[in-house]
Amino acid sequence: MSYHLEGRLLEVCNCKVLCPCWIGEDPDNGTCDTIVAWHMDKGTIDGVDVSGNTIAAVAHVPGNILEGNWTAAIYIDDKASKEQEEALLKVYTGKAGGPIADLVKLIGQVVSVERAPIRFTVVQGKGELEIGKDYYAELAPYLGATGGQTTLSDTVFSTVPGAPVFVGKAPTYRSRNAALGIDLDIQNHNALQSIFVFDA
């Protein structure tokens, strides 16, 4: 199995800015409730074109992120064909190997896999993510002294292995999932954005 994926990441969590998980420290609240969404601007998985699709994980991290044992709910863009859905799930369950497999092995339990309407936008460093009725987040980037986006690289943990990550905050972050014990409606917590290229 092989894949080539190019796209954008939006990630939010209930840690303060910056999320300590990315440098291997414990989450601010002892646990971390997060949404991570990968949008495929273009890409193929075993010859299946998955361009334009988004896959997202809503997750509860019970402690230090590197220790794994996350509990997660997975959402596939409801515009995806069955073939695209199956291809994306092969990659994002680790069955296709590569950099994504190293990340998803941290998930201990998947409570659900669902199709849902997903809206993913990134415009001039600002982004929005909406999944069904229960999840919404917006992202505002931090900018450096020269106007460029503040960037993290070479971190011990990453949801986009090998790619730089642009630091931001979420003016709004709402997430509700009873199976994961998540019920959040908070402002100005951690958010991250990235542009990724994955090959396997």
Image (cartoon, rainbow, N blue to C red):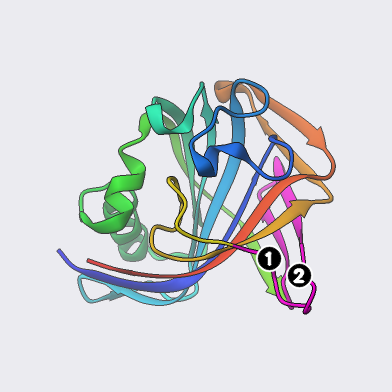
The percent position of residue 37, horizontal first and vertical second, equals 54, 55
Residue 62 vertical position relative to residue 153 in the rendered view, above or below: above
Residue 28 vertical position relative to residue 198 in the rendered view, above or below: above
Question: Mark 2 = which residue?
Answer: 144
Label 2 residue SS: loop
The numbered dot on residue 4 is none
Residue 180 vertical position relative to residue 24 in the rendered view, above or below: above
Q: Is residue 130 in the magenta section?
A: yes
In this view, the residue in front, 7 or 79, is 7
- Kindly identify the amino acid type of the residue bearing the numbered disc 1: Thr
- Kindly identify the amino acid type of the residue bearing the numbered disc 2: Gly
Q: Is residue 133 left or right of residue 152?
A: right
Residue at 77 percent across and 79 percent down: it is 146
Q: Is residue 142 in the magenta section?
A: yes
Farthest residue in the left direction? 1
Q: Quadrant of residue 20?
A: top right
The numbered mark, 2 or 1, whose residue comes first in the sequence reads 2
Label 1 residue SS: loop
The percent position of residue 161, horizontal first and vertical second, equals 39, 57
Q: Quadrant of residue 186?
A: top right
Residue 21 vertical position relative to residue 146 in the rendered view, above or below: above
Question: Mark 1 = which residue?
Answer: 150
Quarter occupied by the C terminus: bottom left
**From mark 2 to mark 1, how far is it between C-alphas?**
5 Å
What range of the chain is rendered magenta?
124-151
Cβ atoms under marks 2 and 1 closer than 8 Å: yes
Residue at 73 percent across and 44 percent down: it is 17
Can residue 145 be seen here? The reply is yes
Q: Is residue 178 left or right of residue 66?
A: right
How crowded pointer 1 is (Cα within 10 Å; few <14, some 14-19, many 20+) is rated as some
The percent position of residue 21, horizontal first and vertical second, equals 54, 38
Residue at 43 percent across and 76 percent down: it is 51
